[in-house]
Image: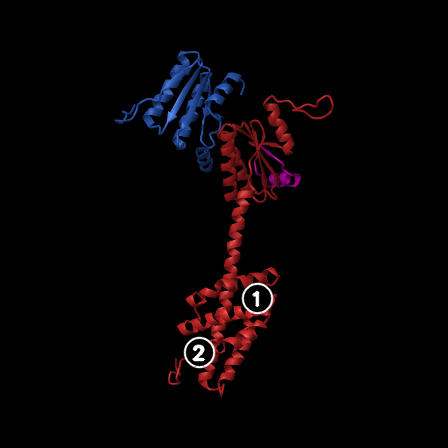
Amino acid sequence: MPEQDVAESAPQVVSAFLEQRREQIAQRWADAPLFRWVFTVSRDEAVEACKLVVDALSEVAVSGRLEDVATAGFAPVRDQLGRMAQTRARAGSTPAQIAGEVAGLRGPVIELLRAEFTDPDTPHAQECVLALTLLMGTLRLVVMETALDANADLIERQRQQLLEVATPVIKLWEGTVAVPLIGTLDSARSQIVMESLLEAIVDQRARYAILDITGVPTVDSLVAQHLMKTVAAARLMGAECIVSGIRPAIAQTIVQLGIDLGSVLTRASLADALAYALSRQGIEVSRADAGASAR
Amino acid sequence: MSQPLPGQSAQVPVLALGDVLLVSLQGELHDGMAEQLQHDISSRISASEVTGVVIDISGVDIVDSFLGRVLAEIASTAALLAARTVLAGMRPAVAITLVELGLTLPGLVTALDVDRALELLSQGGT
């Protein structure tokens, strides 16, 4: 610090100031949009939350690492800041708006700090203001970082859930299993589909496996390749695989892309595929006398 | 014909079940064993009234391109001698690996297990 001769260094002044004016800052911040919108129920709660943040900032200032986002001083409030940012995001705020709201906390606290000095234009005072500004900038980064982390976690969790949920293998009939595929088929999903289908073929001793792609929005060469792999793997296990539910638009795309699905048995709908599997097994479904369908 | 290594059986047993030959592969198949097996099967088919060959690979952990070729060769040889070959008991993991490698064993008839394979052979047709 160039102004070492003046009693204390800027971060220490900032830290001492934050500690002394804790109450005042918290009161001012509780009225700022960020806290007011998050803690709608009770203002006291907002003040308490503000105090925690002020304490954390003061600690960071003592450590002197004003620009270090990962510093330990922020650890106690990371959770809370993340939750606040999430609440705002859920209410429809864009990340830029949230960042703006956090930046809005800077005004009141800078004002208070300037009021501390008899002459706020001395180099030392300027330096302290600069240090506090830096600190507030870092706080903004921490808020954004925690918010993004939480979102990344959420996305990962949902992706995992989707994988688990979206690939059930259904036993349609004795010796016939079906997989209704829903959503885009990527490598990871087709791998899971293949594994669960083969397991089901073994468990159910299935002779026929139906892949229904009614719920697959688009079929490109990669998806077709995945389908063909699954069909080939089922064949190796001794089961015949039928692909059903190819919509007209998709059929046209497949032809236009020049994908050869000639080696794959296809049927228009899941019902047609089931009818084929039944007839191949010598099972006949007919109407009972009364008109109700029977086995 | 290569000498079998010590501690390793030189031959894969070929069992006759009526007019069907049953071969159960276990573990790895070495060059010498494969050659011996192909020879055994073809001579057995021509010697007796064999109409079908069932190759059980439920005890095989890894099917590579070599084994894939051996199986295809056995099937083609048997077809020349008017016997049908069915590959039975492939494990899911093996099937996935084969498909990922692009070895889909075209021309080989497959069945879930030996039971199904025998059923398939007794039905006739394809």
Question: In red, which chain?
Answer: A
First reached walking from the N terminus: tag 2 or tag 1: 2
Disc 1 is placed on an element classified as helix
Spatial CA distance of label 2 from label 1 is 28 Å
- Residue in the image at 39% along x and 23% along y: B24
Question: In blue, which chain?
Answer: B
Disc 1 target residue: A98
Pick whichever, B38 or A173, lies toward us: A173
The extreme left residue here reads: B6
Label annotation for residue B121: none
Question: Is residue A253 within the magenta segment?
Answer: yes
Disc 2 target residue: A16
Q: Position of residue A96 (x, y in %)?
A: 57, 66
Question: Is residue B8 within the magenta segment?
Answer: no
The extreme bottom residue here reads: A119
- Residue in the image at 39% along x and 80% along y: A1
> Is residue A232 something that shows in the picture?
no
In the displayed structure, would residue B49 be above or below residue A136? above
Badge 1: residue crowd in 10 Å (few <14, some 14–19, many ≥20):
many
Segment colored magenta? A242-260
In the displayed structure, would residue B56 be above or below residue B45? below
